[in-house]
Amino acid sequence: MSMMSISQNEMIFLIVGLVSMVCFLWVFMKHPIHILFLFARGIFFILLLYAIQLLGLRLGWEHVVAVNMVTALISGFLGVPGILLLYGIHFIL
């Protein structure tokens, strides 16, 4: 019978992820209106990312951030700093 071995880094990542998920669920269960605000904010920043992408393509920018689920979550949670972070990472990579 083989045992699945988990490295120390994987274990730390798993514990941090579980604690984070419990904290998010606790806040959302305590204040359910936050789910609506998070959803509305996510939609707003998806549209903002899309508008920046269209403007960038029209102006001939080569570096535009694609609009997908990961960029939507980052910009939805972090807001304008999240969009700046996405473009900063995109320019660096």
Image: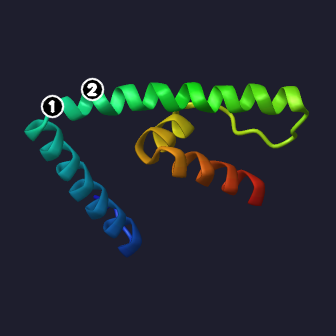
Q: Residue at x 45, y 48 (%)?
A: 78
**Circle number at residue 32:** 1
Task: Tell me if I can see residue 1 in this picture.
Answer: yes
- Asked whether, in this view, residue 43 is left or right of residue 18, the answer is right
How many numbered circles are shown? 2
Q: Position of residue 87 (x, y in %)?
A: 68, 49
Q: Quadrant of the C terminus?
A: bottom right
Q: Taking 28 as reference, is 36 above or below it?
A: above
Q: Are marks 1 and 2 in contact (CB under 8 Å)?
A: yes
User: Splitting the image into 4 quarters, where does residue 32 fall?
Assistant: top left
Q: Among all residues in the image, which is located at the extreme left?
A: 30
Q: Residues within 10 Å of mark 2 (few under 14, many from 20)?
A: few
User: Splitting the image into 4 quarters, where does residue 66 fall?
Assistant: top right
Between residue 6 and residue 79, name the one nearer to us.
Answer: 79
* Helix, strand or loop at mark 1: loop
Q: Quadrant of the N terminus?
A: bottom left
* Kind of residue at badge 1: Pro
Residue identifier under label 2: 36
- Asked whether, in this view, residue 71 is left or right of residue 57, the answer is left
Give the alpha-carbon distance from disc 1 to disc 2, as whole Å: 8 Å
Q: Taking 6 as reference, is 75 above or below it?
A: above
**Circle number at residue 68:** none
* Kind of residue at badge 2: Leu
